[in-house]
Amino acid sequence: MTWPPANLIRTVMVDGCHIPELPLEAVPNLSKINAANRFNSDIIIRNPRHCRNSSLNQQWIAQDATGSAWFTALSLSFPRGEAFFIETIRANREGLPKKLANDVDAFIAQEAIHAREHGYFNRLAAQAGYDTTAIDARLADFITRTSQANGFVNQLVTACLEHFTAIIAHDVLARPDQLAGAPAEAQALWHWHAVEEIEHKGVAYDVWLHMAAHLSPWRRWKIRCKIMAKVSAAFLIFRTQDARELLMQQGFGEREARKALRAYLWGKDGALRRIVGAWVQWFRPGFHPWQRDDRALIQSALEQDRQQAAA
């Protein structure tokens, strides 16, 4: 079978949730592909099945309403978001150096499985009582409009969002306490996803650098800073709006929901406040995602998960 399969990101609606229709047989049998990043680390295609035998309530993180709403809002964006990344990077694969093309294949495989697994998680969120219809429709409209840009811009948008997911992933692994009290399968889902987001964090950026090689360093820096500013604003506005709506579905008033999210995200030791320093690095001349070496964090997280699974 040719990888990636043509029907990789067809989707179906299950219980009101957007779930990628990815046949299990379409996933390579545990492959290992060398990444072309500067550390020559590995992008490993795993094929787990998370959240098949569990359930959620709306406050699934140790009865933490705000944290649960924030992580659920992130998850709701993943199936359509990952599909956009896959379509974008696949369209720009032709003509890449062999090692980078291999990285793209591994990136696509990982992202496809992420979309599938978060589709199941989102189904559990809907079964817990969340109405995700408006959030999904809003995201679909945004991606449709974003996709109308040319391949060069879409590749940079993908790289920008991959930077966001990578620094959030780093924070998830470095601060496992933020998922303490969540069901074991949910914790395993988020830890696995975080590991793989870090493993492939340089791929979309390297593809964009290849596409932008004809531009001067000054021009590349100016373009990527401008696009990141726009992407960041959209990401923060929409994900915060989604989380606020989920809090209001739990019975919060709008003002109360805004206040709770402001404290959770931007208060002392807030979830977004913690990643500002890593986000700012994007704006440095000569930036590359792998200037932050997360390999030890990945290995520590994988070992911890193995110990927990064996316990």
Image (spheres, rainbow, N blue to C red):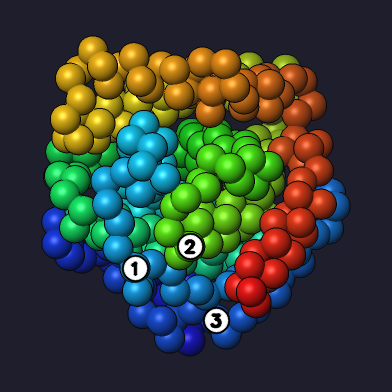
Q: Residues under labels 2 and 3: Cα distance? A: 26 Å
Query: Closest to the observer: 220 or 84?
Result: 84
Question: For the residues carrying marks 3 and 1, which lies nearer the camera in this image?
Answer: 1
Q: Which residue is mark 2?
A: 184
Q: Which residue position is annotated with label 3?
A: 28
For the point 53% across and 28% down, the residue is 271
Closer-to-camera residue (135/54): 54
- Residue at 63%, 68% in the rendered image: 308
Q: Position of residue 37 (x, y in %)?
A: 78, 51
Percent coordinates x, y for residue 234 in the rendering = 38, 24
| 213 relative to 311, above or below | above
Dot 3 falls on a residue whose secondary structure is loop
Q: Amino acid at mark 1?
A: Ser
Q: Are marks 3 and 1 in contact (CB under 8 Å)?
A: no
Q: Earlier in the sequence, mark 2 or mark 1?
A: 1
Q: Could you tell me the amino acid type at mark 3?
A: Pro
Task: Determine the image quadrant of residue 205.
Answer: top right
Could one spot residue 247 in this view of the protein? yes
Could you tell me how many numbered marks the image carries?
A: 3
Which label sits on residue 192?
none
Instruction: Identify the mark at residue 54; answer none if there is no mark.
Output: 1
Name the front one of labels 2 and 3.
2
* Real-space CA distance between mark 3 and mark 1, rounded to the nearest whole angstrom: 26 Å
Amino acid carrying label 2: it is: Ala
Residue 149 seen anywhere in this rendered image of the structure: no
The CA distance from mark 2 to mark 1 is 9 Å
